[in-house]
Amino acid sequence: MAATIGSDCSGLPLAIHVIKGLLSKVERSRNVWYNFSTDIKASIVESDEHFSSILSLSYNHLPIRLKPCFLYMGAFPEDYEIKGSRLKSMWIGEEFVKYNGDKSLEDEAEDYLKALVERNLDLCIRKANKEKFLNVKNSLRRVSILSPFGIEDIDSGARCNEQGFPIGISKLWNLQTLICQQPTTLGLPSEIWEMSELRHLKLYTTIEIGKGYNIRCACKKLQTIYFVRITPSLIRSGFFEIIPNVIKLGIYYIDSPDTEVDLSHLRKLEKLRCESELNKDGSRFLHQLIFPCNIRKLVLVGSVVFRSFLTTLCALPNLEVLVISDCVFERDGEAEEEVWEVTEGDEFRSLQCLRLISLNIVHWRADETNFPILRELYVTGCNDLEEIP
């Protein structure tokens, strides 16, 4: 039957490619495959529409749950590179993704994305227009807010600029993603923490903790938060206790607090980005951090890195990606030339990708026992580095 279907494709590579992806997902029974063969024969005609007909077969046989996710991609320009994490967040915000057993919405969205990729689909813009999927005008779901003087109903996306957060933002009960691009000059209103559906909070501002500021509301659905400017008052307020399910976290230091920053209770945290400013007190903040053991990706920017800290990283059993950028390497309490010496017994046992960017290291001493499964090494801007071990 497979050979018959292949011959029905009339030797068209595109048709064969699409049908291959489609057949891999349907029931393996004679009746189902026979019906496919009939459909293919009807679609392969000598006309300008035969490519569209072949591609339409894939769409017509999509599970119902995947069709809106597929059509949604028609909102992007042709040949636009769509970031998977962004697309999944948008699907969730549109409520295309439904809970299935014990899986999170993010895991379910990942399954949706894989299913679409495997089907080799390539006609979303045309289909979205035909289905009038992108012509709904009776509800506003995405908006860029340019004024702080109030807002209308928004279901899932909002973006703020230098004029600040709009009045009454906490009334957006269904808001899931909030982006503020103004760097470090605006205080974050405490009403943000009343938004129970908020999943992604991307900030370039300061969380001001003062009298009357309430962050005691648990944001159980918050999974992404960038960037949190670390201050002593923020630590004392128990901020990190209200984001127990965060998966991606970015923190930024200017002044290093005297107290440690304990992230060990953030058991779902997988991706952590730490930034500070060199030549300031904040440059030593890495040594105030207590990491959760589930970290998979760690990005360090603009800090002093001591050998003892790198030894600490070896204890992270799931660390797969390590990026060190614009940092200064120093030995603990020594003023010798800049060296990264991975001591005997230090083993980055899960590390697969290591990126070293614009560092001052001269010597790097290590061997294969320190990086047993490293697959990718990227070194750039390390102009004084004499050799790679």
Image: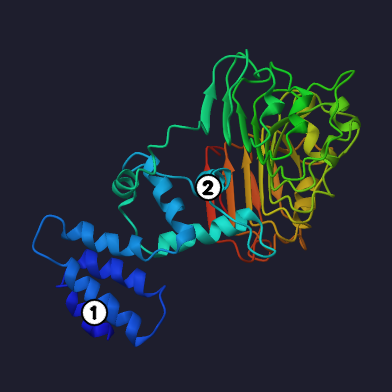
Q: Callout 1: few (<14), some (14-19), or many (20+) C-alpha neighbours within 10 Å?
A: many
Closer to the camera, 186 or 125? Answer: 125
Q: Earlier in the sequence, mark 1 or mark 2?
A: 1
User: Can you say which quadrant of the picture contains the N terminus?
Assistant: bottom left
**Quadrant where the C terminus is found in the figure:** bottom right
Judging depth in this view, the residue of 150 and 110 nearest the camera is: 150
Who's the residue at 28% across and 60% down the image?
56
Identify which amino acid the numbered label 1 is placed on: Ile
Percent coordinates x, y for residue 121 in the rendering: 34, 58
Query: Which type of secondary structure does the marked residue at label 1 adopt?
Result: helix
The answer to whether 114 is drawn above or below residue 242 in the figure is below
Q: Nearer the viewer, residue 139 or 71?
A: 139
Check disc 1 and report the residue beneath it.
5
Report, in whole angstroms, how far the alpha carbon at label 1 lies from the one at label 2: 34 Å
Name which residue lies at 57% across and 33% down: 157
Instruction: Name which quarter of the figure residue 129 lies in.
Output: top left
Image quadrant where residue 169 sits: top right
What residue sits right under mark 2 in the picture? 91
SS for callout 2: helix
Along the viewing direction, whichever of 241 and 363 lies nearer the viewer:
241
What amino acid is found at the position of numbered circle 2 in the picture? Trp
Q: Is residue 59 above or below residue 244?
A: below
Q: Residue furthest front?
A: 138
